[in-house]
Image (tube, grey):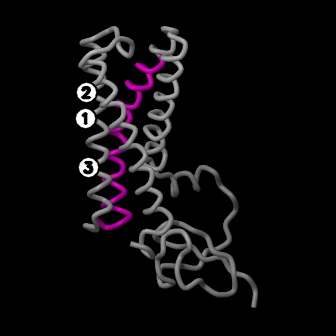
Amino acid sequence: MAKQQWKCIVCGYIHEGSELPEICPVCGAGRDQFIPLEAQPANLIHDLWHTFRLHAVMAHFPNGLVPALWVFLLLFWVTARPALAEAVFWLLLLTVLTVPVSLASGIYDWKTRYGGEKAPIFLKKIILAAVLFVAGCGALFLHFAHPELPAGGGVAAFLYLFCLAVMMACAVLLGHYGGKLVFHWKTRR
């Protein structure tokens, strides 16, 4: 029998073969969620329009910016170069600006792609994103209230570092739970 292409209507995975898989290897959907895919000429604009997920793009900003912020902060502590402290500020600001877009697009995807399922993993991600945003706003407030940060010491420096540490923990956990959703949320809970 000739190979045929099948598309998972849940996640868009394309399977090639004479038979359908029992479950989608990407999202865990059952074989009843596959439809035959008709041969179509490649069309980049069409593909982007039908497959682009804003959340998949926006979620990677905080997950990349927060660790980079920590790298620049550590380099600042080692070298005391003011440009590195300024880089920490700009990375922090960019993170705080992208989190609301990531959160809103994540909620949209949750409602449209996952049917608003009330699984604990979605609540965890929403709470973690909110905490990430609040901690980032707190760090920005401290930065403006104490321009010497990230240098210096005292309570303000401790609170600033605490906010940045909370942001790092949230970014790591958001990435972890996002990976669970994308790669095997239906097969392993």
Look at mark 2 in the image and give the residue it sits on.
138
Lateral position of residue 25 relative to residue 172, left or right: right
Q: Is residue 109 magenta?
A: yes
Q: Residue at x 28, y 13 (%)?
A: 144
Lateral position of residue 6 relative to residue 172, left or right: right
Towards the viewer: 78 or 181: 78
Kind of residue at badge 3: Ile
Q: Is residue 106 magenta?
A: yes
Question: CB atoms at circles 2 and 3 under 8 Å apart?
Answer: no
Q: Secondary structure at mark 2?
A: helix
First along the sequence among labels 1 and 3: 3
Question: CB atoms at circles 1 and 2 under 8 Å apart?
Answer: yes
Query: Extreme bottom residue here?
Result: 1
- Alpha carbon of mark 1 to alpha carbon of mark 2: how far? 6 Å
- Alpha carbon of mark 2 to alpha carbon of mark 3: how far? 16 Å
Lateral position of residue 29 relative to residue 167, left or right: right
First along the sequence among labels 2 and 3: 3
Kind of residue at badge 2: Gly
Rendered-image quadrant of the C terminus: bottom left
Q: Residue at x 29, y 55 (%)?
A: 124
Where is residue 118 shown, x and y percent of the image?
25, 67
Magenta-tinted stretch = 87-116
Count of numbered tags: 3
Query: Extreme front residue here?
Result: 154
Question: How dense is the environment of label 3, judged by Cα within 10 Å: few (below 14), some, or many (20 and up)?
Answer: some
Q: Which mark is residue 127?
A: 3
Kind of residue at badge 1: Val
Question: CB atoms at circles 1 and 3 under 8 Å apart?
Answer: no
Q: Secondary structure at mark 1?
A: helix
Look at mark 1 in the image and give the residue it sits on.
134
Question: How dense is the environment of label 2, judged by Cα within 10 Å: few (below 14), some, or many (20 and up)?
Answer: some
